[in-house]
Image (cartoon, helix red, strand yellow):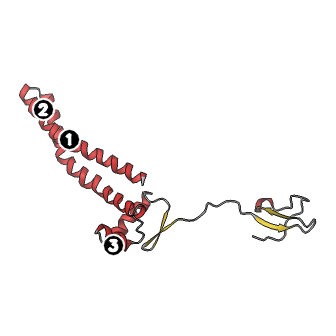
């Protein structure tokens, strides 16, 4: 949930800055024209252009999609909705849109600890691969011991292991 919150915060800040460029540009243009300073009204015109074109882009393209992804992540992690149908019903989205948004969430790693199997989300309960301990009875000294595949010999007498019991 932290990754999507960081991305959402960055998009919000960008959208707010672009939005503030519009009125700031108007003020700079008016002040620059009022005091007869072409550099100030030139900056004002630049800010007006950035604000005019950047504001809808910032909110519609940068912020809104991430807000939807954050809502889907919240539905999975906090509301415990684990099927596409449940998420779609809760968020009033189509199942096709939910699938697309879930794909994006997995690509951007906004849902760590979950795996998707079809239209169902499951907790990823896989364990890290590591050394597997096996048990054996030594044919030479009769000792029962645990060993790993890279050290397949009796720790007491050094006889190589022939039989494995997981």
Indicate the secondary structure of the residue bearing disc 2: helix
Q: From the viewer's perspective, is the residue at label 2 or at label 3 nearer?
A: 3
Residue, disc 2: 41
Indicate the secondary structure of the residue bearing disc 3: helix
- Relative to 109, is 139 on the left or the right? right
Residue, disc 3: 95
- Residue at 29 percent across and 44 percent down: it is 13
Label 2 neighbour load within 10 Å: few <14, some 14-19, many 20+ = many
Residue, disc 1: 20
- Relative to 87, is 132 on the left or the right? right
Distance between mark 3 and mark 1 Cα atoms: 36 Å
First reached walking from the N terminus: tag 3 or tag 1: 1
- Relative to 113, is 29 on the left or the right? left
The x, y position of residue 160, in whole percent, is 87, 64
Indicate the secondary structure of the residue bearing disc 1: helix
Q: From the viewer's perspective, is the residue at label 1 or at label 2 nearer?
A: 1
Front one among 83 and 94: 83
């Amino acid at each position: 949930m932290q990754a999507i919150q960081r991305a959402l915060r960055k998009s919000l800040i960008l959208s707010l800055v672009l939005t503030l460029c519009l009125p700031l540009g108007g003020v700079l243009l008016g002040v620059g024209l009022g005091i007869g300073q072409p550099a100030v009204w030139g900056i004002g015109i630049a800010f007006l252009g950035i604000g005019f074109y950047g504001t809808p882009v910032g909110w519609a393209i940068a912020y809104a999609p991430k807000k939807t992804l954050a809502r889907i992540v919240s539905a999975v992690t906090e509301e415990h909705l684990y099927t596409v149908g449940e998420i779609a019903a809760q968020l009033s989205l189509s199942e096709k849109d939910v699938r697309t948004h879930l794909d994006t969430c997995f690509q951007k790693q906004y849902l760590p600890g979950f795996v998707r199997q079809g239209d169902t989300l499951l907790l990823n309960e896989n364990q890290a691969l590591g050394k597997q301990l096996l048990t054996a009875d030594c044919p030479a000294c009769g000792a029962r011991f645990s060993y790993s595949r890279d050290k397949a010999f009796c720790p007491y007498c050094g006889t190589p292991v022939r039989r494995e019991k997981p």
